[in-house]
């Protein structure tokens, strides 16, 4: 009788353990499904801001810059609207574009900083397109990042966006953090030309500590004490865009970078000679 009781108890315990594991698996699957739905939502939202994204890059760059993200016809419309902007009032179309683009980037950055999304999941939404235009983005997000060489009309509208970002500093900070994280992921995947990776790594030799400090502060602000673990994990991922430290397996290896540059140059020359 005791033996039967022990068997029943063991079976019941095993069944409960199985149910517990199954429930954990279901919860993990549900959480992942929620993440995928959220990612798809942000993907659609980013696609819908395509024209606004074009306006932001247009205003972040100087007059006549070749590299844009919208067609020539749309650029001409931006030029007309910019030149027609009143010197005595806000430029509504530009501010609307800023709100659409920067709040989207900030929202995604917030989700990552709160641990709700991973940078590896978010990166495909933007690919390398956003990173190839990180210079004009930073021209707006960081007033001291570039020299102001544009026309007076261009600078007037650009300044309005910069002022808007000053008054929405949390959005500005989280956009900068997201750009840093995206760049690190691109470096990890070797998605950018070697020269771009080298220039970024050189820059991060000067700004890396500042970038990590900004991430740490924002992460703790959003999550409290729990943010320490998240900040540690995210700050570690930023090292993918920096030169590899001695004894570390994370970061850009200079020998590997040189090899990539030689291969990239060879492919480019072969392409040009065809």
Image: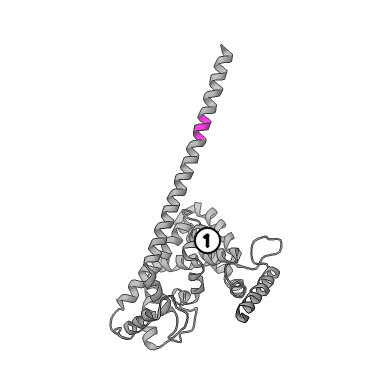
Residue 104 occupies quadrant: bottom left
Q: Residue 188's x, y, as percent?
A: 60, 63
178 to the left or right of 77? right
- For mark 1, give the secondary structure: helix
Left or right: 260 in relation to 216: right
| Residue at horizontal 35 percent and vertical 81 percent from the top | 78
- Give, as a single range, the part of the protein colored magenta: 16-20
Please state, as top left, top right, bottom left or bottom right, where the C terminus lies in the image. Answer: bottom right
Magenta stretch: residue 3 in it?
no
Colouring used for the render: one colour
Residue placed most toward the observer, 164 or 130 = 130
Give the crowd class for mark 1: few <14, some 14-19, many >=20 residues within 10 Å: many
Tell me if residue 19 is in the magenta stretch: yes
- Residue at 45%, 65% in the rendered image: 174
Residue 135, image x, y percentages: 50, 76
User: Where's residue 69, x and y in %?
Assistant: 44, 75
Name the chief secondary structure element in magenta.
helix
**Residue 156 located left or right of residue 25:** left
Examine the image and state in which quarter residue 212 appears: bottom right
Above or below, comparing residue 215 to residue 165 in the picture: above
Placement of 206 over or under 251, stated as above or below: below
Q: Which residue is mark 1?
A: 216
Residue 48 in the image: state x and y as whole percent: 36, 66
């Amino acid at each position: 009788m005791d033996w039967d009781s022990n068997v029943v108890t063991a079976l019941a315990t095993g069944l409960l353990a199985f149910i517990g594991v199954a429930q954990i698996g279901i919860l993990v699957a549900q959480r992942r499904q929620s993440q995928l739905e959220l990612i798809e939502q942000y993907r659609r939202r980013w696609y819908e801001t395509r024209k606004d994204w074009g306006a932001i890059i247009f205003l972040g760059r100087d007059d006549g810059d070749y590299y844009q993200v919208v067609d020539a016809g749309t650029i001409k419309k931006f030029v007309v609207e910019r030149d027609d902007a009143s010197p005595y009032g806000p430029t509504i179309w530009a501010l609307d574009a800023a709100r659409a683009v920067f709040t989207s980037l900030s929202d995604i950055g917030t989700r990552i900083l709160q641990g709700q999304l991973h940078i590896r999941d978010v990166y495909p939404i933007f690919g390398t397109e956003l990173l190839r235009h990180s210079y004009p983005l930073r021209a707006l997000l960081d007033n001291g990042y570039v020299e102001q060489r544009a026309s007076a009309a261009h600078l007037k509208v650009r300044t309005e966006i910069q002022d808007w970002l000053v008054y929405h500093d949390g959005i500005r900070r989280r956009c900068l953090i997201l750009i840093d994280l995206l760049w690190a992921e691109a470096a990890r995947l070797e998605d950018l030309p070697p020269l771009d990776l080298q220039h970024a790594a050189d820059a991060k030799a000067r700004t890396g500590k500042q970038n990590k400090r900004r991430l740490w502060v924002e992460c703790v602000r959003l999550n409290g004490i729990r943010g320490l673990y998240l900040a540690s994990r995210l700050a570690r991922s930023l090292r993918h865009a920096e030169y590899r430290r001695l004894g570390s397996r994370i970061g850009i290896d200079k020998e590997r970078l040189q090899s990539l540059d030689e291969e990239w140059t060879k492919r480019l020359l072969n392409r040009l000679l065809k």
